[in-house]
Image (spheres, grey):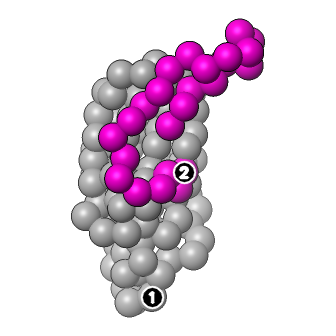
Amino acid sequence: VEIYSYKEDCPVGTISGYSESILYVKFLPSGQLLIVAVDGTVSLVDGVSEVATASVGEDVSIARFSGKLLIGTESGRVYIYDEELNLLATCAGHGFPVTAVDY
C-alpha cells in the first residue's frame, strides 16, 4: 500500500507485507489507517508504522467501518471489531458469501 500526500503531491511512505489484494482502506477519526486484505489480514497503521493486526483466518468478501469494523467472509461469517481491532463478536448463520454489511 503506497501512502500518498496530495498536499505535498508525492508518495510519503509504503506499507508492505500483504500477500493478497487489499479489499478495504479507511482513514479513521483517530488519524490512523485501517487496511483489510482479501486473505483476512487486518492492520491498523499510524503513519507508516503498524500499530495493531488481526486475522479473521478466512477470505474476506466485504468490509466496512462505521464506529465498528464489520468484516463479511466468503464462508458467511461476520466479524465485528472495535477501533483498536479487539474482536467483539462473530456472527454465523449461513454458508454463502456475505455481500453487504452495515452498523
- Is 36 situated above or below 10? below
Label 1: which secondary element = loop
Percent across and percent down for residue 92 are 34, 79
- Residue at 50% across, 51% down: 22
Q: Tell me where residue 84 sits by quadrant.
A: top left
Residue 60 picture location, percent across and down: 43, 66
Q: Position of residue 96 (x, y in %)?
A: 45, 88
Q: Is residue 2 left or right of residue 15?
A: right
User: Mark 2 against mark 1, which lies toward the viewer?
Assistant: 2
Label placed on residue 24: 2
Crowd class of label 2 (few under 14; some 14 to 19; many from 20; radius 10 Å) = some
Total marks drawn? 2
Does residue 18 show up magenta in the picture?
yes
- Mark 2 or 1, nearer chain start: 2
How far separated are the C-alphas under marks 2 and 1?
A: 20 Å
Residue 47 appears in the figure? yes
How would you rate the neighbour count of disc 1 (Cα within 10 Å): few for under 14, some for 14-19, many for 20 or more? few
Q: From this viewpoint, is residue 70 visible?
A: no
Three-letter amino acid code at the position of disc 1: Phe
Residue in the picture at 38% in, 90% down: 95
Residue 6 percent coordinates (x, y): 74, 19
Most foreground residue, 37 or 90 = 37
The answer to whether 77 appears left or right of 86 in the picture is right
Say left or right for 55 vs 28: left
Q: Nearer the viewer, residue 83 or 75?
A: 75
Q: Which residues are magenta?
A: 1-24
Task: Specify the quadrant that holds the C terminus.
Answer: bottom right
Amino acid carrying label 2: it is Tyr
- Vertical position of residue 7 compared to residue 90: above or below: above
Residue 96's disc number: 1
- Between 65 and 5, the residue placed more toward the observer is 5
